[in-house]
Amino acid sequence: MPSDVCPRLPALNDNVVSSDGKTGEAGYNRFTMSSERKTFWIKFRNLFFPQDQIPREGDKEVLPFFALITLALGWMYIIYVQRIEEVYLAVIFTIMMIVHLSLYWAIFRFIHSTRQLRLYFAFQGLMAFALILIGGDFGLAIGLYSSLIGNAAGALRRSRDLVYVVLAYLALAVISIIIISGVEVILEWSFVAIPSIIFSGFMG
């Protein structure tokens, strides 16, 4: 055999040969896949719960509340999306509901910045307003704004911003009900709807 010809090397695979001659799978593949899954989960968790922020006392206790909100909003979505006749509005309603619900879980990204928290609740309030108009039922106003008030009560606690947020949400709820059903309905239901929004929010 000529000296300038290199011998053909065997093809590499995922198997390794142990000292006793038995063939087995390389462990590095399993380790790599496990590490990739763990890295993905950490990145996903950090998307909602940043690890570089110091959690406040009682923050972890609101997770059951978010789980309850997820079930409630999911139920409201199933009920009201069926009443939307236009397909494109149903798609918009679905996307907005997903974003609205996801932001509940993402609040810990904004909890340590007063300015970001104000923008967060302003955006959530306006998104709820749009969802109510698309859904076309004032029952959504009670459900969405009572949930947001409960979220604001936990995040803002006993601050002046909480008062502003509650008043703004009540105003948006009243305006949305008037647009959908008229002034007569808000006059008829104000003694029930407004206390229900406040009570349900702070009880949550």
Image: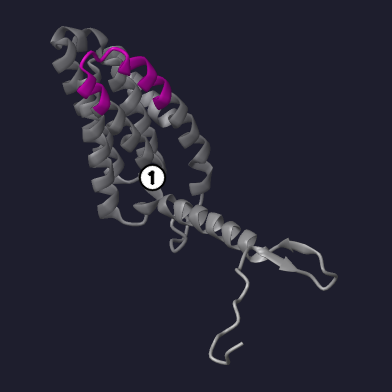
Q: Is residue 20 above or below residue 71?
A: below
Q: Position of residue 75 (x, y in %)?
A: 42, 20
Residue extending furthest toward the right: 20
Dominant SS type (magenta) = helix
In the foreground, 162 or 70: 70
In the foreground, 25 or 169: 25
Q: Which residues are magenta?
A: 73-91
**Within-10-Å neighbours for mark 1: few <14, some 14–19, many 20+:** many
Q: Is residue 10 above or below residue 133?
A: below
Instruction: Tell me if residue 152 can be seen.
Output: yes
Instruction: Tell me if residue 204 can be seen.
Output: no
Q: Position of residue 103 (x, y in %)?
A: 35, 41
Does dot 1 land on a helix, a strand or a loop?
helix
Q: Is residue 115 left or right of residue 155?
A: left
Q: Disc 1 marks which residue? A: 155
In the foreground, 23 or 45: 23
Q: Position of residue 194 (x, y in %)?
A: 29, 20
Which residue is painted at 60% across and 68% down in the image?
11
Quarter of the image holding residue 5?
A: bottom right
Q: Position of residue 38 (x, y in %)?
A: 55, 56
Residue extending furthest toward the bottom: 3
Q: Is residue 74 above or below residue 4?
A: above
Look at label 1 and name its amino acid.
Ala
Which residue is painted at 32% across and 35% down in the image?
100
